[in-house]
Image (tube, coloured by chain):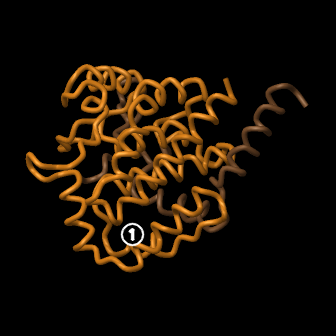
Chain colours: A orange, B brown
Amino acid sequence: MTAFARVAEEDRLRVGWYSLLARLLGGPPDRDFLGSIAALEGDETELGAAVQALAQVARGSEPKTIEQEYFDLFLGVGQAELLPYASYYLTGFLHDRPLARLRSDMSELGVARQEGVSEPEDHIASLCEIMAGLIGGAFGTPADLAAQQRFYDTHIGCWAPRFFQDLQASPTARFYMPVGTIGGLFLAIESQGFEMAA
Amino acid sequence: MSESEVRSAERREFFRKAGLGVGALGAAAVTLATGEAAAAPEEQGAGYRETEHVKRYYALAKF
């Protein structure tokens, strides 16, 4: 039995949401992934409605178009509309103290960036991936709630809701608009969930 | 039920009501997730046991 199979059901779901956000924001979707997104179904919750909206845009989109949108939003040299980095949102600068703090916390957790990747670790996608790993036990034993909350409060909760709001409101975002909505709703649920456990 | 059991039941209920587990999506999200994230520690190569010196590399999505 893997560590993941012993994780409580709701925490496995949280891993799923974080991983989904990590994959959506880590790069434009290929045709396969886009197909899986198009097949998603929502329910009557707010989160469910946002998922339905995303699935609908996915059904009418070509990977090439989304790739361009991703580039314009996050990558365009000197003109990316949004910079989804903790350091930038917290200090106005990239590579500033929040990134140093993250690196030190990561090394304590025994997590490192993959070799050959030059992207700073405080990108929203990698933070979501680390959260998923902490909850699901990808880095060894699953982290307890207190440790999860420490990481969340220090590196995600203090800025990512603003980023998702910006993404949702961006005039450039079409496919990524509902991604912003989903991210914002999910993090609000996470914050509340941590408060309940405290 | 102990206090912590009550608390975790409340938490479960809260996440359920918030829509985290919506039938199809719950399953789909986890399936989507297994793409490249969350490699189980068991999958580390055999004999790779330097314990505390071993860093577990997380797969930062290809930017």
The residue to which callout 1 is attached is A33
Q: Position of residue A44 (x, y in %)?
A: 66, 64
Q: What amino acid does circle 1 point to?
A: Phe
Q: Position of residue A31 (x, y in %)?
A: 33, 75
Q: Position of residue A73 (x, y in %)?
A: 23, 54
- Comparing B29 with A159, the one in front is A159
Task: Find numbered disc 1 in the image and state the secondary structure of the residue it sits on.
Answer: helix
- Comparing A85 with A147, the one in front is A85
Q: Residue furthest left?
A: A78
Residue A146 position by quadrant: top right
Image position of A170 (left or right of A164): left
The residue lying at 68 percent from left, 28 percent from top is A197
- Comparing A153 with B39, the one in front is A153
Neighbour class for label 1 at 10 Å: few (<14), some, many (≥20)? some
Image position of B53 (left or right of A191): left
- Comparing B1 with A51, the one in front is A51
Image position of B16 (left or right of A17): right
Q: Tell me if residue A156 comes above or below residue A179 in the rendering.
A: above
- Please state the chain letter of the residue tagged with numbered disc 1 in the rendered image: A
